[in-house]
Amino acid sequence: MIGALEGTDLWIVLGIVLLLFGGTQLPKLARSIGSASSEFKKGIEEGSKGGVDSETSSDDTTGTTKT
């Protein structure tokens, strides 16, 4: 089983990511991950407030409710 990442392991992973994406793409990648994370959190908050009813679905094209 894979253990926790330690200091040396993190530096190696960071170096590989830098080689794969390049220095110019990393800020764009970090920004997109941050915005995706905030959208996900926003969706979770809306879902917990009762934004979507599980009995009726908006993709139900027949107009009937699920039983």
Image (cartoon, grey):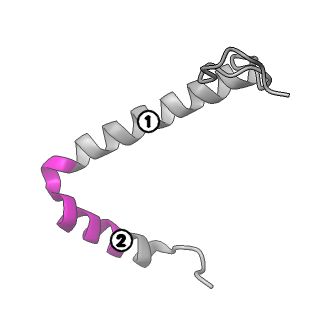
- Residue drawn where x is 59% and y is 74% of the image: 4
Q: Quadrant of residue 67?
A: top right
The front one of 38 and 18 is 38
Residue 5: x and y in percent read 52, 73
Q: Quadrant of residue 23?
A: bottom left
Left or right for 25, reference 1: left
The front one of 51 and 44 is 51
Q: Amino acid at mark 1?
A: Ala
- Residue drawn where x is 80% and y is 23% of the image: 55
Residue 32: x and y in percent read 33, 38
> Counting residues from the N terminus, which is met first, the one under dot 2 or under dot 1?
2
Disc 2, SS: helix
Q: Is residue 21 magenta?
A: yes
Q: Quadrant of residue 61?
A: top right
The dot on residue 3 is none
Disc 1, SS: helix
The residue lying furthest to the right in this view is: 67
The residue lying furthest to the bottom in this view is: 1
For label 2, the residue is 13
The residue lying furthest to the front in this view is: 62
Which region shows up in magenta? 12-25
Residue 33: x and y in percent read 39, 42
45 to 1, vertically: above or below? above
Label 2 or label 1, whichever lies nearer to me, is 1
Q: Most prominent secondary structure in the magenta stretch?
A: helix
Badge 1: how crowded within 10 Å, few (<14), some, or many (20+)? Answer: few
For label 1, the residue is 36
